[in-house]
């Protein structure tokens, strides 16, 4: 028996009972977080360009702190990759999940 207001759909098919449901979409808040991450990634890109151009000697810095810039660039890159993954995870459309149960098997 399903709870009232449940979005789970139950159907019998090929000797199994299949339960299907969709994830909540997150509403407007999801898009606000995605917009913030995209804006942050624009600033992130500017930081990457600055650090790389400084390391390559394309900026006006006379003696850049190379060890610091290399460490900063490594951590900055990891942070940017994490932000890209998070933006993708938040903004991608949800996919329905399903579970099939029969006397002989359980399939996700």
Image (cartoon, helix red, strand yellow):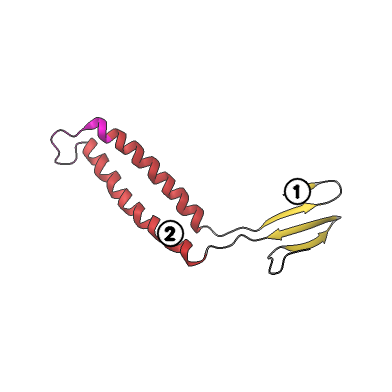
Q: Is residue 61 magenta?
A: yes
Q: Could you tell which of marks 1 and 2 lies nearer the N-terminus?
A: 2
Which numbered disc covers residue 107? 1
Rate crowding at label 1 as few (under 14), some (14 to 19) or many (20 or more) other CA atoms within 10 Å.
few
Q: Position of residue 28 (x, y in %)?
A: 48, 67
Helix, strand or loop at mark 2: helix
Magenta segment range? 57-69
What residue is shown at x 68% (from left), y 65% (from top)? 7
Q: Position of residue 92 (x, y in %)?
A: 52, 57
What residue is shown at x 43% (from left), y 59% (from top)? 33
Judged left or right of residue 35, residue 22 is right
Cα distance between the residues tagged 1 and 2: 34 Å
Screen quadrant of the N terminus: bottom right
Q: Where, by quadrant of the figure, is residue 69 drawn?
A: top left
Q: Is residue 79 magenta?
A: no
Label 1–label 2 contact, CB within 8 A: no
Q: Position of residue 107 (x, y in %)?
A: 75, 48
What residue is shown at x 42% (from left), y 63% (from top)? 32
Rate crowding at label 2 as few (under 14), some (14 to 19) or many (20 or more) other CA atoms within 10 Å.
some
The mark lying in front, picked from 1 and 2, is 2
In the picture of the structure, the residue carrying the numbered disc 2 is 33
């Amino acid at each position: 028996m399903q709870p009232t207001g449940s979005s789970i759909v139950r159907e019998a098919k090929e000797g199994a009972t299949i339960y299907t449901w969709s994830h909540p979409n997150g509403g407007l808040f999801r898009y606000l977080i995605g917009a913030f991450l995209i804006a942050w990634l624009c600033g992130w890109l500017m930081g990457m360009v600055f650090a790389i151009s400084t390391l390559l000697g394309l900026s006006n810095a006379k003696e850049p702190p190379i060890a610091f810039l290399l460490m900063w660039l490594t951590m900055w890159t990891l942070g940017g990759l994490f932000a890209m993954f998070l933006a993708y995870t938040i903004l991608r459309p949800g996919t329905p999940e399903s579970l099939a149960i029969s006397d002989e098997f359980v399939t996700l």
